[in-house]
Image (cartoon, grey):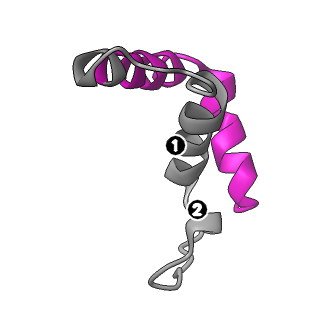
Amino acid sequence: MTVTYLPPYAPELNPVEAVWNHTKYGDLANFIPANRDDLRRSIVDSLNQQRSDAQSKYSCFRYTQLI
């Protein structure tokens, strides 16, 4: 294991940015929610789906080029 110090703001090195990117521009692209609850439910569903997908998690870390 190697410890790497990151700059204070570096979204390209943060795997969470890739998760939000997939949710925002992938799963919810062209999505028009009926109300705020519908939007929240869709976001939670997208995040839960990504959480259970090992390949998706690996892709988010690969996106950062830290591994």
| Amino acid on which the number 1 mark rests in the picture | Trp
Residue 58 at what x, y percent from top left?
Answer: 67, 36
In space, the residues marked 1 and 2 are separated at their CA atoms by 26 Å
Q: Is residue 56 above or below residue 15?
A: above
Count neighbours of disc 2 (C-alpha within 10 A) and say few if under 14, some if 14 to 19, many if 20 or more.
few
Q: Which label was assigned to residue 36?
A: none
Q: Secondary structure at mark 1?
A: helix
Residue at far left of view: 37
Q: Nearer the viewer, residue 10 or 23?
A: 23
Image quarter of residue 12: bottom right
Q: Is residue 26 above or below residue 7?
A: above
Which secondary structure, mark 2? loop
Give the x, y percent position of residue 20.
Answer: 52, 43
Horizontal side of residue 40 vs 62, given as left or right: left
**Residue tagged by mark 2?**
1
Relative to 60, say whether 50 is above or below.
Answer: above
| Magenta-tinted stretch | 40-67
Q: Residue at x 62, y 24 (%)?
A: 30
Whether 23 is among the magenta residues is no
Residue at the (56%, 25%) spot, across then down: 28
Q: Is residue 13 left or right of residue 51?
A: right
Q: Which amino acid type is marked by label 2?
A: Met
- The residue under label 1 is 20
Decide whether the magenta segment is chiefly helix, strand or loop: helix
Query: Residue at coordinates 25% horizontally, 25% vertically from top-left?
Result: 36
In the image, residue 15 sits, relative to residue 54, either above or below, namely below
